Amino acid sequence: MSFVGKCVILFLSIAALPAADKDKDKERFAPGPASSYPARQTSGKVTIAVEAYDTEEKTRPAFGKMNPYELGVLPVLVVIENGGNQALDLKQLRVEYVSTDRQRIDATPAKDVRFLKAPQRPGPTGETPRKLPLPIPTGSKKNKLASWEIEGLAFAARMLPAGESVHGFFYFQTRHRVGSQLYLTGISEAATGKELFYFEIPMQ
């Protein structure tokens, strides 16, 4: 093989490395069964578990160095296990974060998270930094919320066969408080269209 041919093969091999690493990162995050989470609820033969990812210890296995919570977005993992003999229709699933003061916050679609602006951090004295009178070029900054993990790990299941489990993240523009709840509605039996009872799960 010519020297040029060897160089081309080497270049293609190096170019493929990031994609391989990305696939490896995707496989690294594997949540446990719904029964392994303290915040869960069972209705009939359907169990739903939830967990708020509000610490770096929790977010790192899923999102790597990018911590959505530090950028003003709370990821909440939802695991749904269908122990019944009927497939479940999840196309109308709606998830709300209910704060301790009963404020209801709808989930932000994963595709829209990249357009959110992180909250401005206070200055050293606790005051919000003032705007500069003249624009100063600072260079382009990478949008961390545009990371592939946001959409790649989002809850996307539309059907749940009998005896199986699905999981994924929902994203909320809020700070997490112990005692808040996740409110889920819109799950129905695929064959009959009968809607299941709502789930209201306290997050410890």
Image (cartoon, grey):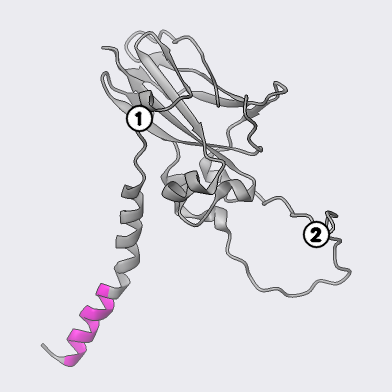
Give whichever of discs 1 and 2 has the lower sequence position. 2
Q: Is residue 133 above or below residue 70?
A: below
Residues at marks 1 and 2 touching, judged by CB atoms closer than 8 Å: no
Q: Is residue 130 above or below residue 26?
A: below
Tag on residue 122? none
Q: Amino acid at mark 2?
A: Gly
Q: Which residue is mark 2?
A: 123
Horizontal side, residue 32 vs residue 69: left or right: left
Boundaries of the magenta span = 3-13
Tag on residue 166? 1
| Image position, residue 38 (x, y; %) | 46, 25
Give the crowd class for mark 2: few <14, some 14-19, many >=20 residues within 10 Å. few
Asked where in the image residue 35 lies, by quadrant, the reply is: top left
Whole-angstrom CA distance, mark 1 to mark 2, is 42 Å
| Image position, residue 91 (x, y; %) | 43, 25
Q: Amino acid at mark 1?
A: Val
Residue most extreme to the right: 133
Horizontal side, residue 71 vs residue 48: left or right: right
